[in-house]
Amino acid sequence: MYPLWLSHFTATSSMGRGLAQTLDALRARRGGLAPCGFDTVDLQTFVGEVQGVDQVVLPEPLAAFDCRNNRLALLGLRQDGFEAAAAAAVQRHGAQRVGVFIGTSTSGILQTELAYRRRDPHSGALPADFHYNTTHNTFSVADFTRQYLGLAGPAVVVSSACSSSAKVFASAQRMMRAGLIDAAVVGGVDSLCLTTLYGFNSLGLTSGQACRPFDAERDGISIGEAAAFALLERAPARPRPGDVLLLGVGESSDAYHMSSPHPEGLGARLAMEQALAMAGLGAADIDYINLHGTATQSNDAAEAKAVAALFGTSVPCSSTKGATGHTLGAAGGLEAVVCALALQHGLLPGGLNTRALDPALPVHYLVDNQQAAPRHVLSNSFGFGGTNCSLLLGCAG
């Protein structure tokens, strides 16, 4: 694989809007999880809600796309000059040569939930102003992003649960390698809705407090929402110091169980091995791993076994879900941006909320920030159904 350049990137989550707020929160070890007060939800759990989403107004020509997920997407696209970077890519390559690859799982489900509250009491018909195609439909967020940025290349949505917005990097890389496009807007957008909150609660997977990845007494996830985007282009012949490069991608599907990972983490290990092989690197070359780390008993245990089997117990690693919550289909994109910040600013973020590490999990888990100069980092995203993806990022020296 030839390296791809993250020429621009941004993230918006409960930690903050844009890179400056996100980096400041990571440095200050300040998370965005709070007791759930979302909509009509009556659950004792914590969520990572992005403030101000309801106040976002879509441009009039795109009003049919109005839903929480696309509002969150727009809020994210407006950070860090990302719109201008996409426009500059169009000038360099042409609108038809810039693709859009977005990961999501919830998409605009909330809009359907709200519509069902307004069904006709006699016929049961949904309200006339409900537009499934441009809201609930999983393709909606890619279509909205494409039209908002004025792009005309291929547009794709990956909806593979929690690996969705990591796998879009691989989708874009394949299209660029095939010569179909020259650049790609990749990322993930997932927003809060009742279906996921009550659904994960019914599975017994939500915690009653802010989630505690890799803690001995971890008891479940905190659900969050986020929008993260990166502009992928071919790496320049001579990258500048600080340029972040996508060096490898690994994908696997262990298909062990619909909602539980393989207990030995076999699929996770395959994904990490493939990312290393694509980058031409060995386990000893990795300086930090951003773990999937959801804070469920089975997920953390399986990932720890996979990491230990491949890397041993010395590589620093942590999960940032204690700060953002599990942003589901946006997690891969959000955590790729966290890894890019780690590379550029020499910050290995310690996990939040973890009070007593589980001694049965044989990894070097960071509970405090660590200053370092990482050259290569790995970001893991593992979804329901055994859909696994690992991204390997590097920093030009």
Image (tube, rainbow, N blue to C red):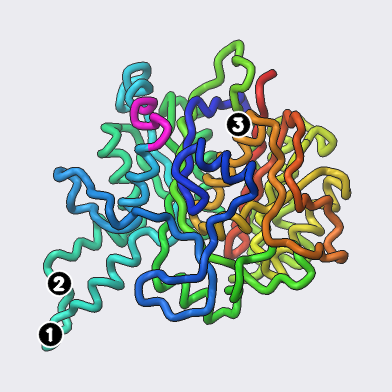
Q: CA distance from mark 2 to mark 1?
A: 11 Å
Do the residues bearing badges 2 and 3 touch, measured as CB atoms within 8 Å? no
Determine whether 110 is above or below 97 in the image: below
Q: Residue 246 shows which numbered tag?
A: 3
In what element is the residue under mark 3? strand
Residue at point 28% right, 45% down?
144
Tell me which numbered mark, 1 or 3, is placed earlier along the sequence.
1
Tell me which numbered mark, 2 or 3, is placed earlier along the sequence.
2
Q: Which residues are magenta?
A: 79-86
Circle 1 residue: 123
Residue at point 47% right, 71% down?
36
Give the amino acid at mark 2: Pro
Report how many numbered discs are placed on residues in the image: 3
Q: Residue 127 shows which numbered tag?
A: 2
Determine whether 395 is above or below 185 in the image: above
In what element is the residue under mark 1? loop
Closest to the observer: 43 or 293? 43
Question: Local crowd at mark 3 within 10 Å, few (<14), some, or many (≥20)?
Answer: many
Looking at the rendering, which quadrant does residue 1 occupy? top right
Q: Residue 226 shows which numbered tag?
A: none
Does residue 41 show up? yes
Residue at point 79% right, 63% down?
264
From the viewer's perspective, tell me whether residue 280 is left or right of residue 80. right
Residue at point 70% right, 53% down?
351
Q: Quadrant of the C terminus?
A: top right
In what element is the residue under mark 2? loop
Looking at the rendering, which quadrant does residue 50 occupy? bottom left
